[in-house]
Image: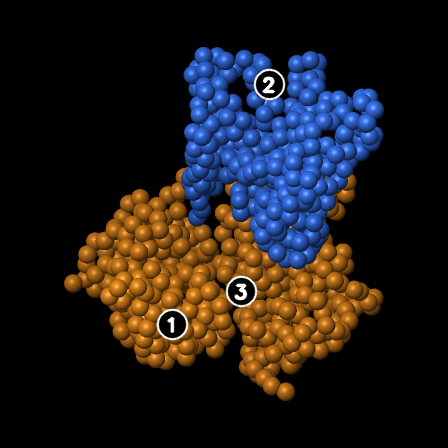
Amino acid sequence: MKSNTNTLSPKKVSMKDFGLILVFIALVVILAIVSGGTFVTPRNLLNVVKQTAINGILAMGMTFVIISGDIDLSVGSTVALTGVIATMFAHPAADGAANGQYPFIVPILLALLVGALVGALNGVGIAYGSIPAFIVTLGSMTIVRGLALIISGGSPIFDVTPAFESIASIQVGGVVPILAVYLIIIVAICAFILGKTVFGRRIYAIGGNATAASVSGINVRKLRVIVFTIAGLLAGLCGLLVASRTITGSPTAGQSYEMDAIAAAVIGGVSMSGGSGKWYGVVIGALMLAVISNGLDIMSVNSNFQLIIKGLIIIFAVLLDIKGKGKRS
Amino acid sequence: MSEYILEMNHIMKSFPGVQVLNDVTLQVRPGEVHALMGENGAGKSTLMKILMGIYSADAGEIVLDGQKITCKNPRDAMEHGIAMIHQELNPILDMQVFENVFIGREKRTKLGLVDKAGMLRETRALLADLNIDIPSDAYMRDLSVAQCQLIEIVKAISLNARVVVMDEPTSAITEHEVDTLFTQIRRLKAENVAIIYISHKMDEIFEICDTITVLRDGQFIGTNPAAGMTSDQLIRMMVGRDITEVFPKADAEIGGPILEVKNISMGKRVKNVSFELRTGEVLGIAGLVGAGRSELVETIFGIRRKSSGEVFIRGQKVNIHSPKDAIANKIALITEDRKFTGLNLVGSVEQNITLVHLSQLFKNGLINGGKEKEVSTHYIDELSIKTPTRQTLVGNLSGGNQQKVVLAKWLLTEPDIIILDEPTRGIDVGAKRDIYLLIGEMVKNGKAVIVISSEIPEVMGLADRIIVMSEGRLTGEVGRPDFSQERIMTYAAQFGE
């Protein structure tokens, strides 16, 4: 009775994703032509990947959360808090030498740990307190931002060790920005978890139908806590990277980063109702956002107009997604 | 004037790659109850969706009262006096009865504000007129499924509907409520309203319907008066072959007790229930809706927390606190509602089949695509699940095939105790028989099976022994030689202390 066009094997990219890739390529071609070739210079393309890195990493964490059927609004604030903490512990020693007051590894571990802790607390509130994720993370978004402001005394913390600065700024082989390398590693790990592991499959299962997953013997609560911990951990990583790149721990950093991460996931075809979405869609979604802002910058489009264009593209992408799904049933 | 109030003539409809309706004709007289029968996938829903303007037909015409009409959406259809009561009702739970009756066409005062008093008054009058004892300001949340259905009927009447489509209206209501529903149907008939009645329940069809139209694989098979037709003839028309036996009962050797439940209670829903289950045995649990049957098995399975009592498996006391514990003890529960608790509708057939057993199949936590394909393909073949591929989303399958996916996912765990809660609800004759045969296979292989069903003939057909529940308590037990519908009903209707 019902038509079935969704019969492709998992290795193939479905038509819908293919459409997304086409839109992306078209966008690159248009920008290449309009910018007179400036956009497609290797230097600029590497720059685009670099610009994608932070949002791309956050978006991967957000993808876990959205596939599991939830949302995390707190990741932007977590970027600020972990950035502030990392900078505090990456301060150069008083003697002015290159060494820090604390070993090199301390700010790194603290940023990751605090990020994971925020995520885990979100997860516990959602899974064991049965409070909607939107509410819990809306609350923690504000709380975490407040913590960042208190700890930093309300103003940015400057000055870090050269070693800390190099975390986000060195270039591999003198060409490839290290941020791009981080992005690729994180994407590879997330793609593996989502696509190849029992744990990943269960995230899709709870997003598709949490009750059925629970009846099937899956510990849904535990899984939720882990999913939010992953999102928090990646937010901590981004906080670290942002602090290193800007040599600043700013309590106001990461404003609306959660929205860009959600946008990348949504453009990439991750369903807001949970249970479906592919990692490569999210990568294209994140790249698309970076391409748009980079391309418009090159063409010196006023940044206020850029906001409007970005917003239209998000809505248009989801519209395409819905129309694509509508054809199926 | 035509003899028919509604004619759907030579309707064609195809979806990409599938012809779902091929020259189908449906002619309905005023004041008749017209059964539309066919297996799942026969095209009944598509035909009704075309009538309601949800789909548009590729060819053919719809004639209402001699006038050719086109409905672009359900609103058009309603304005023409065609109303549909959907199988899965979606009332707005936080609204009151009168608001639901007038939803989308709220009465206004002169100032353009909502005329609450006027709507309340009219709803109250309608309810009184129909002898329906529901307050017009009750919240939908507080009503039973059957009461929500009655409200839908009230809504249809308030629309002055001339044709009312009822899609499996009795699939979720009790026998007593069915009587109320039938009273209302007869009342509508008396007012010359035509009713198109979709159901899989034979006895109901013969009780309430005047005319039967059968579809099979999108083809029109025939329209006959219900009087003079037998259910065997009807089944033959529907499935295109004879079904010699409705309930094939397998001969299995009944062994020793495998599951013993002692004095189990769960809040006020299950009270002090004890029973045992033997290997090779099919134990039926009968009772009215709300008797606590589902709650009992869900407590055994660890979905609900028991307040007291003990469970023994092969003589060993077990502590089951979650479905995970139950699965580890080789118990499987096919829950009552496949859409809410059984399946991930946005997941593929394969992902659903392997979900429960995933960590056993892939002990190192990594999914081996080849092995998963092998396992899922095996079960798709074994249970003859009709699906284009193993990657098809379960939400796109018919009810019967969805139910088979649920069975496959539990059979994969190789359970010793299989509990089936309403395993054939809302599925067609062919798929029902497949499931009956499967139950036979299970007990032949020495498994123990518990079947809960609200259809007493089904429990009687399948079970070796039936226990009956009422108001959370066990009120009776009947062995196969003593099975009788009256006896079971008597136990099921034992109320009060």
Where residue B486 appears, as percent x and y from the top left, is 55, 81
Q: Residues within 10 Å of mark 3 (few under 14, many from 20)?
A: some
Nearer the observer: mark 1 or 3; the answer is: 1
Q: Element at badge 1?
A: helix
Report the coloring of the rendering: by chain
Image quarter where the N terminus of chain B lies is: bottom left
- Residue, disc 1: B208
Position of residue B94 relative to residue B47, above or below, is: below
Q: Residue lying at the far bottom in this picture: please name it.
A: B497
Q: Residue drawn at (72%, 72%), measured in percent from left and top?
A: B307
Task: Please name the color used to draw chain A.
Answer: blue
Nearer the observer: mark 2 or 1; the answer is: 2
Q: Element at badge 3?
A: loop
- Residue, disc 3: B246
Position of residue A165 relative to residue B31, above or below, is: above
Q: Residue drawn at (77%, 71%), measured in percent from left and top?
A: B310
| Residues at discs 2 and 1 in contact (Cβ within 8 Å) | no
| Residues at discs 1 and 3 in contact (Cβ within 8 Å) | no
Q: Earlier in the sequence, mark 1 or mark 3?
A: 1
Q: What is the CA distance from the residue labelled 1 to the residue labelled 3?
A: 22 Å
